[in-house]
Image: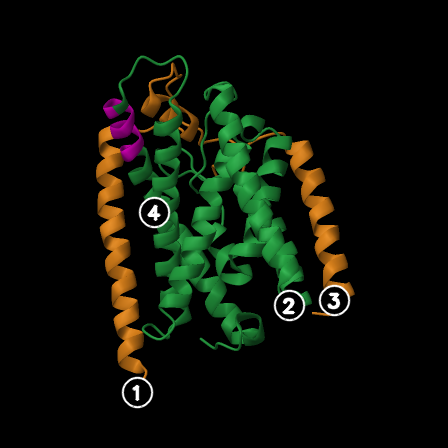
Amino acid sequence: MAHIHLEDGSFSLFWVIVWWTAAIILIGISLYLLRSGKKTDSRKITIAAFCTAAAFAIFQVSLPVFGGVHLNLTPLIGILTGPVIGSFVVLIINILSAAIGHGGWGMIGANTLVNIVEVAVAYATYRLLKNIIPSLFSRAGIATITGLLCGNIAMILIIVISGVQGVSQSTPQILTGLSLLAAVNMGVAVIEAFVTGLIVAYIGNVRPDLLGGERS
Amino acid sequence: MTALPEKKGLLVFLGLLALVIVVSLAAYQITGHMGIEDRFSHAVGLPHETGDETGGGWFGLSLEGSPLLYGLVLGILAIGCYAAYRHFSV
């Protein structure tokens, strides 16, 4: 949902390299954690594959809400696969999206960082609320809202820190504009929260083993 | 015994949604009706064309990027999912 919809050239080359480097470092850490830990559950790999396909499919579809917006299912990816595998999933989705013309190649690093924030925060919120909110639907929904809110904040920070080439607006003006954009974006988070809550609750009913044995 | 926390969870969730909807609608009223690309350009001060990205497609849904490549990549991903599902016997 939070996705930097700016064309290549909006950020200077320096900042494109900075965000790409930061994303590669995070992916490297994920790879290290994945390889150094115990053997990955084969079910997680299959779920990650399904998440990649589903998120890629829905990510490209513009919904007729608020003039055109799209979902991206990153909180669902976080809840189902965790932040380590989820980091790879969002990187692949961003690369494939750029390959078909949705988003610039130079923006993949920054967008991957934004999406990793969404994945990690949604995962952490979902886990932390386990003992407080037993309902899978409500917990997944709250995790989605929290994850997407943090993703939007990360998006704003990345754009404000980088600056946009060729604009005459001051930083406070850009900050105001982006805050309004993020607020509109959050309206779509409501749809995403319902979708994520329903999917997690459904999985809890039919395959609780995929959620670590949790039933809805 | 779990009925109360479950209701509390749902109330928190619905309260959050209500708050988000109010803030979002207010922001939408301020910024006006425009597509996501235009909304971004407008937010950062880049030149933009006014208009939305809705309409056309199926029931107002439209695809971003090349539809042909979208179908191709999605097909490959679906085959990959099927292979993983069979291979790991999930």
> What secondary structure prevails in the magenta region?
helix
Labels in figure, total = 4
Q: Nearer the viewer, residue B79 or A52?
A: A52
Task: Give the residue type that dot 1 points to.
Answer: Met
Mark before the other along the chain sequence, 3 or 1: 1
Point out which mark residue B88 bears: 3
Q: How is the image coloured?
A: by chain
Q: Is residue B37 left or right of residue A24?
A: left
Which type of secondary structure does the marked residue at label 2 adopt? loop
Q: In the displayed structure, does residue A98 sit left or right of residue A155?
A: right
Of the numbered discs in the image, which one, if any, rests on residue A149? 4
Foreground mark, 1 or 4, reads: 4
Asked which secondary structure carries label 1, the reply is loop
B62 w.r.t. A123: above or below: above
Same chain, marks 3 and 1?
yes
Disc 2 and disc 4 on one polypeptide chain: yes
| Front: mark 2 or 3 | 2
Query: The chain coloured orange carries which letter?
Result: B
The span from disc 1 to disc 4 (Cα, nearest Å) is 32 Å
Is any part of residue B29 visible from this angle? yes
Mark 2 or mark 4, which is nearer to you?
A: 2
Element marked by disc 3: loop
